[in-house]
Every structure is written in structure tokens, then in C-alpha cells.
């Protein structure tokens, strides 16, 4: 086991700190990490990453892992995945396994997850700890598929959590890494299914807003992408069919290359739009023009992970917002963004003009990438951003870092908060929020369990101490 005092950074390089960074891939090694940290009065956070490849890192864009002058552990090779051979369609994955590694075992065993994130490079523990999501009306986030978990607590004991203790399971499902070190996670899966996946860029913004509820109710999965200055929305719908149905136009051997090229191209376009804002509207039109018009049939995991390469410097304000029974909250959250983008752009005539000169002097193009809407059901975990909702839209308003948009994002965030939204834990750009107020009695329920499992605050950092209103002094008394 190698300990090194060095600089830890997240993938986007938006958070860094000097910490004791250690790689530990067995429970025994993790026990030694706990022992040493306690002896030195240090706290521990677990980070994704640690493998020698480009997409191995900590992908959270919030201060959820940063732990200056304390301990950060990586577990890249704690990555075995196995099925429970009891006919339950359940699979257990170690915390450091990537979603891609999980998919491979599911595929071999003819199983599917009901939902997953867009990229497949994040870790099982990282995705579950923060309630990471894709879309789908039959479930909430990946965390809602969790039926069991093994956590190593601050005393070095393995705590087995299962359905026999529903309260503890609700806490473990979205735990922010604050209950201990996740050793493994058990997911409820389904017999393998495929998805009929349709993309279209022909739906107008008005139609997309009017038909959101209908599309949500009549499809298994629904996503919207809106590029600023466009009057159309890219709509993705996916519907379940049996695993026996033949593939049609499924991603082939060139898919990885295609995705990589798309990642590089959109990065280049966003750099131009950020450095030469005059070209922002035409660049958005260019991105929108690349929307595929297609229908395919493919295994669920291939459809879920439609994007595995990303521009690195994205500011991605991300909130879970209750749609409201008639989807009026969804409409309000969506229209606030489109209206504000237009207001700041000061159009001479229309906010859908591609030409920079058709916007007045003093114009500001405050968002130069997508607004992404992924519809899910709701969540049961105490600390899931979608907890207690009717249906949820996971909103993201994304721009390249360097866009002049501070005030705009403050306004969007204030509106989304006023609608009862809660930020994605991995993209919480405003760490000073009052999380106790945001989560109410769910916060109390989680915090009671956290205090029981980690009375010394061994697994907290500055951000999570703020979340749980724990004083720093005396958080961990040296043993
Ligand atoms: C390009 C990109 C695409 C993204 N796409 C999506 C998406 O589609 N959907 C979505 O919801 N999010 C998405 N995110 C957000 C991101 O994936 C999440 O924040 C995720 O939690 C990162 O997981 P990670 O494996 O990188 O772990 P980290 O970011 O390092 O950690 C996440 C959390 O898990 C904890 N943790 C990790 N391992 C353990 C362990 N073994 N024991 C205890 N705690 C642990 C950490 O302490 C931290 O609290 C994306 C981010 C990026 C940069």
C-alpha cells in the first residue's frame, strides 16, 4: 500500500487539495488506513479513479471528496462483480468497479439495470453514494436499485445492510460517503431487455413543453436537450422490448470512435463559442444540426451509455425538480432558462437568430451549451435529491467554463430552489446552501444514522461537515 502526500484533483480540475493519498484494494488494507488515520487524528474520504487511463478519476464537480491535509483513499482494484446465483436477478459489485465492468457481468448473465448514468466510467460506489441518475419513469436513480450494501465502519467492522432494515437501507442508498467505506453494493436487476431508442430534433420548444407529460407517461424513458438560440428540442424516447428482439442499427464497433470524435468536436466548438462569444448562436445551431434522426433497437446498457467522452471544462448546474402533477413546475423551470438566456442576449428581433450581429450591443451569451432534462420517477433514499417528489425532472444547465454567467446562474439557481429543487450532490456549486432546510425530516433521519455509524466524524470533510452541521474542532480526536 502506497501513501503519498500529494495533490489530489478531481477530473475537471475544479477542486484540488494536498492530502495523504493512498491506494487500498482489500478490506485488510482499508482497515490499516482507518487505523492510521485515527491514530493521526485525520479524516478519510474515498475518491474514484486511480487507474492508469484517461477516464479514471473523481468525476464529482463539487467539494464532496476534497479533504485537505487529511486522507483520500482510492480503491481501483476493489472491482469484482458477481451474480447471486439464487434466481433473484441480483448482482453484487465492489465499490471500485466501474459501471462498464458492472455492465459486462450483467450482459454475460443476461441481466439489465433498470436505469444507469450516461457515461459508463464512474464507479459503482461513487454513483450510488451521490444518487447518480439517467432517466426512466419506472424508477428513480441508480441508488433506488440498491437492495444491499457492505460498509466498513470507523471501527474496522463490516456492516451488512439489507432489506431487513429499511431505514438503514434508505440511508445507505445515498450516503455521500459519510457512513464509512462502501465495500460492495447489491443491485436488483431485471432479465435482460432491449430498448427501442428514437432520437429526433424536429420537436418545437412549445410542443416539447406542451407534450412533456404525455411523452413521459407514454414512454419508458424520456430526455430533452435544448441548445440556446434554437427553437427545436432534441427528444430521446426509449421503450422496453424483450432481450430476444433483434438489434436494429445498434451501436457497432465504431461506436467508441464516434463518441470520442463527438467529444473532441463539441469541446472545440465550445472553446470557440467561449473565446469568441459573437459566434455563440451559430455554434449552438451547429451542435443542434448534429442531432440524429434515428430509431434503433439495442441492449439497454448500450442505449443508456450514449456518451462516454466529454469536454472537460463544463459548468453544469444540476437540480432535481418535482415536475408537479400537471408538469407546471417542469415548464416553469424550463421557461425560466430559455427566457433568461434570451434576456441577456438582447436580440434585435428574435432569440433564434444564428447571427451575432442580430443581438444588440451589450449582449451576453450566458449559456453556450445544453439544457438537459432527464425525467425519472422519484427517490426513496433520505438524501436523494428526488426524495419525496411526485415525478422528477433532473435539470442541467450547462456552459463552458469561462462564459460570463455568474449572475445568470445565480438567478437560475434561485428559481429552481424556489420550485423546491435540490442540487445534485456531485454538481453542487453552491456548497453553502442550508441542506437541513432542503431535506427537512429526511435530513434528521439520515443524520441520526450517520451519528450512530460514525460518531467521531471520521468520514467527513469540510463540505459534509457543513451539510450535517458538525463543528470541525474535535471532529476526530487522535487515538
Ligand atoms: C463528464 C461527466 C459526466 C457525468 N454524467 C453524469 C450522469 O449522467 N448522471 C449523474 O447523475 N451524474 C453524472 N456525473 C456526475 C458524477 O458522475 C458523479 O458525481 C459521481 O458521483 C462521480 O463518481 P466517481 O466514481 O467519480 O466518484 P467520486 O466523484 O470520487 O466520489 C463521489 C462520492 O462517492 C464517495 N465514494 C466513492 N467511493 C466510495 C467508497 N468506496 N466508499 C464510500 N464513499 C465513496 C465519495 O466520497 C464522494 O462522496 C457526471 C460527471 C462528469 C464529470
Image (cartoon, grey):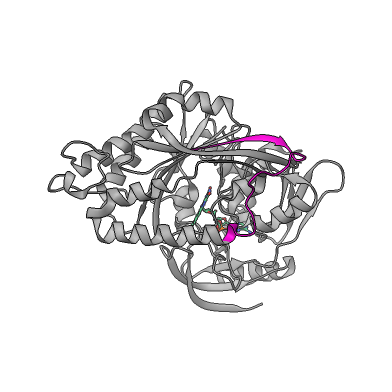
Question: Splitting the image into 4 quarters, where does residue 340 fall?
Answer: top left
Q: Give the residue drawn at x 24%, y 59%.
A: 276
Q: Position of residue 319 (x, y in %)?
A: 44, 41
Question: Splitting the image into 4 quarters, where does residue 51 fall?
Answer: bottom right
Q: Give the residue drawn at x 39%, y 50%.
A: 287
Number of marks: 0
Position of 304 relative to 102 (above/below)? above
Is residue 122 in view from this perspective? Answer: no
Per the rendered image, the range of residues in magenta is 235-256
Q: Residue furthest top?
A: 326
Is residue 197 in view from this perspective? Answer: yes
Q: Position of residue 263 (x, y in %)?
A: 47, 59
Q: Give the residue drawn at x 70%, y 53%.
A: 103
Question: Splitting the image into 4 quarters, where does residue 203 fall?
Answer: top left
Q: Position of residue 38 (x, y in %)?
A: 60, 67
Q: Give the residue drawn at x 75%, y 61%.
A: 80
Q: Position of residue 144 (x, y in %)?
A: 64, 40
Position of 75 relative to 305 (above/below)? below
Amino acid at each position: 500500500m502506497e501513501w503519498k502526500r500529494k495533490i489530489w484533483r478531481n477530473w475537471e480540475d475544479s477542486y484540488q487539495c494536498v492530502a495523504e493519498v493512498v491506494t487500498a484494494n482489500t478490506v485488510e488494507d482499508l482497515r490499516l488506513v482507518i487505523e492510521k488515520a485515527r491514530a493521526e487524528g485525520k479524516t478519510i474520504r474515498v475518491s474514484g479513479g486511480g487507474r492508469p487511463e484517461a477516464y479514471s478519476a473523481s468525476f464529482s464537480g463539487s467539494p464532496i471528496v476534497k479533504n485537505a491535509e487529511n486522507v483520500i483513499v482510492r480503491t481501483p482494484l476493489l472491482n469484482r462483480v458477481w451474480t447471486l446465483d439464487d434466481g433473484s436477478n441480483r448482482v453484487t459489485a465492489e465499490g471500485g468497479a466501474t459501471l462498464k465492468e458492472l455492465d459486462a457481468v450483467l450482459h454475460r448473465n443476461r441481466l439489465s439495470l433498470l436505469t444507469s448514468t450516461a457515461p459508463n466510467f464512474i464507479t459503482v460506489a461513487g454513483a450510488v453514494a451521490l444518487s447518480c441518475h439517467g432517466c426512466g419513469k419506472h424508477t428513480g436513480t441508480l441508488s433506488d436499485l440498491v437492495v444491499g450494501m457492505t460498509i466498513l465502519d470507523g471501527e474496522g467492522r463490516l456492516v451488512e445492510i439489507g432489506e431487513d432494515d429499511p431505514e438503514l437501507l434508505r440511508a445507505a442508498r445515498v450516503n455521500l460517503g459519510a457512513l464509512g467505506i462502501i465495500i460492495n453494493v447489491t443491485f436488483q436487476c431485471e432479465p435482460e431487455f432491449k430498448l427501442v431508442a428514437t432520437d429526433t430534433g424536429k420537436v418545437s420548444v412549445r410542443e416539447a413543453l406542451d407534450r412533456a407529460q404525455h411523452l413521459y407517461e407514454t414512454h419508458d424513458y424520456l430526455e430533452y436537450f435544448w441548445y440556446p438560440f434554437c427553437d427545436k428540442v432534441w427528444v430521446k424516447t426509449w421503450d422496453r422490448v424483450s432481450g430476444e428482439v433483434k438489434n436494429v442499427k445498434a451501436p457497432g464497433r465504431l461506436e467508441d470512435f464516434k463518441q470520442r470524435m463527438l467529444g473532441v468536436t463539441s469541446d472545440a466548438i465550445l472553446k470557440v463559442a467561449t473565446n469568441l462569444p459573437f459566434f455563440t448562436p451559430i455554434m449552438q445551431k451547429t451542435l443542434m444540426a448534429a442531432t440524429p434522426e434515428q430509431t434503433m433497437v439495442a441492449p439497454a446498457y448500450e442505449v443508456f451509455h450514449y456518451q462516454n467522452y466529454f469536454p472537460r471544462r463544463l459548468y453544469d448546474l444540476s437540480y432535481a425538480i418535482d415536475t408537479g402533477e400537471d408538469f407546471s413546475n417542469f415548464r416553469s423551470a424550463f421557461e425560466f432558462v430559455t427566457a433568461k438566456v434570451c434576456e441577456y442576449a438582447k436580440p434585435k428581433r428574435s432569440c433564434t437568430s444564428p447571427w451575432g450581429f442580430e443581438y444588440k450591443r451589450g449582449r451576453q451569451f450566458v449559456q453556450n451549451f445544453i439544457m438537459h432534462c432527464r425525467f425519472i420517477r422519484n427517490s426513496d433514499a433520505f438524501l436523494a435529491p428526488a426524495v419525496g417528489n411526485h415525478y422528477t425532472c433532473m435539470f442541467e444547465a450547462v456552459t463552458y467554463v469561462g462564459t460570463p454567467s455568474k449572475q445568470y446562474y445565480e438567478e437560475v439557481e434561485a428559481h429552481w430552489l424556489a420550485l423546491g429543487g435540490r442540487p445534485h450532490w456531485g454538481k453542487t456549486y453552491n456548497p453553502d446552501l442550508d441542506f437541513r432546510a432542503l431535506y427537512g425530516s429526511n435530513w434528521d433521519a439520515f443524520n441520526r444514522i450517520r451519528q450512530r455509524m460514525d460518531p467521531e466524524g471520521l468520514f467527513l470533510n469540510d463540505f459534509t461537515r457543513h451539510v450535517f452541521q458538525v463543528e470541525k474542532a474535535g471532529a476526530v480526536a487522535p487515538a
